Structures are given as C-alpha cells and as structure tokens.
Amino acid sequence: MSILFRRARLLDDDVDLRWDRGVSALDAAGTLAAAATDEVVDGGLLTPPFAEPHVHLDAALLGARAPNRSGTLREGIANWARLREELTADDVIARAEATLAMYREWGVLRVRTHVDTGSAVAVTALLELRRSTPGLQVVAFPQEGILRAPGRHEAWQAAVEAGCDAVGAIPHFERTTEEGWESVRLAFRLARAHGVGVDLHCDETDDPGSRNLEVACAEAMAGGVPHVVAGHCTALHSYPDPYAAKVCELVAQSGVQVVCNPLDNVVLQGRYDRYPKRRGLTRVDELWAAGAHVGVGHDSVMDPWYRLGTANLLDAAYMLVHVGHLTGEEQMKRVVRTLHTENHLPFGEVPRVEVGARELLHWPVPDEVELLRLRPRPRVLTA
C-alpha cells in the first residue's frame, strides 16, 4: 500500500508526496490526488534520514556497570579502562545492536562509531557488525593516546589495517604539546597510506593552550585525505577572541568538519571552574559565520561518560540551541537541518527528499521549531 502525504512541510515549502517503495511522486501542496490504495496522511514535516557522526558503541549502555560518581571526563575514562578489560565480542555486539535499534527509532539511519583501539575484542566485534549493518562506519580511536605508553601505537595501527573507515587520535591527551601535534601528523600519514578519512577527538579540554585544531587544518590543506573531522574542539570556546577568529577561518579554508557534541560537553567541560562556569561547547555560530562545516553528535548513550543518552539526535540539537544561544528562528532551523545535511558528510553524499529517494522521515509536527520543542518519534520509511 502506498502513502500520500498531503500538505506536508518540506524545508520551506508545503508539498504533496507519495511513498510507494520509495518517493514515487512529489509536487506542490494540493496537486496529487489520492488513489484508492493510498493511506492518506495530512500535514506533518518531511525530512531525509538523520545521521550520527560521533558515538561510542563499544561503551554504550555500560554506564550502570561502573557509575561515574564525580560525573567527570577523567573518571569516565578510568571507569571505561576497567570495563574494557571485561569485554566480550557477544556483549559488544549485543549492546551495539540495541543502541543502533534505538537510533533507528529516532530516524537515524547512518551511524559513525569510534572504537577504542585498546580493545582488540571491540575492534573485531564492531568491524564484524559493520559487515551486516548498512550505514555503519567505524573509526579507530586510541582512547588513551598512541604515544603515552608502549603498545598503543601498534594496536591503533592494527585497527586501521583491519579495515576501519577513518583514523582517530586524541592529541590533547598525549603527554606533551609536541607529542599531541605528532599524533595528529601520524594520523594523517596513516590515513593517506590507507586511503581513508581522519576523525579526531580534538582539543576536548577547557585549556586555551590546547592548539591541535590548527595542526589538523594544516594537515588537511596538504591533501590526500578524503574527509577530515575534528570532534569536540571545546578549547576553541576558551581561546582569546582574535585567535579564535583565526582558527575559525582556518577551519573553513581547510574543509575540516567540526562536530559539536553538546550533551557530553556541557557536563564534562567547565569542571575546573568555580563560578562562572564555562559552557564548554565549541563556537558553532562563529564557525558558521566563517563558512565552516559543522556537525552535531550525540556522543554517549548511557555510557561511563554520560548516563542520560537517548540516541535521539534532537536531544543534542535541543541542548545546542540553548547552550549555544542559537534560539533565533533561522538558527533553530539550521541546527535541525544539520542533522540531515552536514551530519551525512562523513558518509559521503547528503540525501535529499526527491523522486527516487528510498529513505524518508515523517514527523507529526508542522515545522522544525516544533520538532525541536517536542522531539517526537518519526515515522521511518525505507524502501
């Protein structure tokens, strides 16, 4: 049976759309006549599927096993390091599948996960899961750095060689500033050798002296890597304004995509502050103004860093518009549209709602502002 969506909102227009194993017709509102076999749905909002550019499926749903008593990033890392030693392939896959099912219920059909290269079990399990999961990508992520201790570089490299989709690093966690910069360069070198992208946890700190993003931009401008993501970039929040302006411009020129993770960063950053406490999110508005690509990630789904995750990207967007002072009408629309436009950039082509499209979300709200306000579940259609 086909579905006729009548007078539904699509971006800035009202349209009629027929779904019949894909989008079979699309025209102005009031144009398409209902067929006898149509299910007719009046109103609502139509979008392409959402994409998740930054999550940790290997740690998802583990938060209750090792509660983070302080709520801090460092305790989360310490708790994860203990849990990591107990991982089994079956457990990793079961939790990842459960989390992916949650994402799908919220209209997220593409997911990029980081996997801690300190666990060969997790790397193997998630690469195995990827083979049977369309839209899943895996990033080789060295949670505790690649230069801090023997064996970490080798484990990280082995994960990339096993077939990860992108090379990760965590330069601000290395022992020295210079080793952080070197880890960025090593990541790009390895990515070029394997023809894959780079996806860094970059400057996830309140320290205004953490300056790895500009190194990543310089490496990206040297070429040879298909797509570069710098996740978090929270130090940019604390940079002096003249330096921040320079870095935002550099990000735009280099084509590096910054992925903001509002839910985690608003609670993990500012922990060394008394009052006032910094919000800790990267400068989304200034990156936009410079012409940079920005994504919005959920980051944690009930894991050792953030127990409150839901796999609903609208929750991350809702946090961003509040904490980032992005509650202007057009700003709110842009944040929502990021979830189905720039969030897809790590996966390649950005999907559109057009005749022939094989994926579609229908939301029971009239527009994007109401979508943010209510954050309902969508109707998820796939051919």
Image (spheres, rainbow, N blue to C red):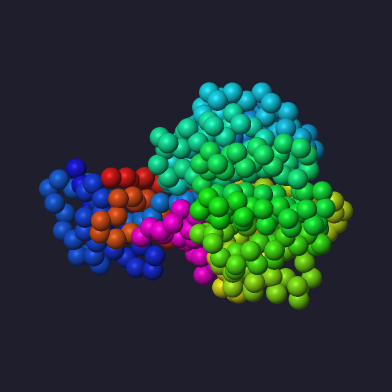
- Quadrant in which the N terminus is drawn: top left
Give the quarter of the image for residue 150: top right
Give the quarter of the image for residue 29: bottom left
Q: Give the residue drawn at x 45%, y 47%.
A: 110
Q: Give the residue drawn at x 76%, y 48%.
A: 173
User: What's the magenta bit mostly, secondary-structure-wise?
Assistant: helix
x and y, in percent, of residue 140 in the image: 59, 43
Q: Give the residue drawn at x 60%, y 68%.
A: 221
Please state if 367 lies on the left or on the right of 58 as rendered: left
Q: Where is 171 relative to 224, above or below?
A: above
x and y, in percent, of residue 326 in the image: 60, 65
Q: How many marks?
A: 0
Q: Nearer the viewer, residue 278 or 232?
A: 232
* Span colored in magenta: 328-352
Q: Does the magenta stretch include residue 330?
A: yes
x and y, in percent, of residue 253 in the image: 59, 73
Please state if 121 lies on the left or on the right of 7 as rendered: right
Specify whether residue 149 is in view: yes
Q: Residue furthest front?
A: 193
x and y, in percent, of residue 156 in the image: 64, 41
Q: Which of 88 and 312 is in front in this view?
A: 88
Q: Give the residue drawn at x 51%, y 41%.
A: 163
Q: Which residue lies furthest to the right in this view?
A: 274
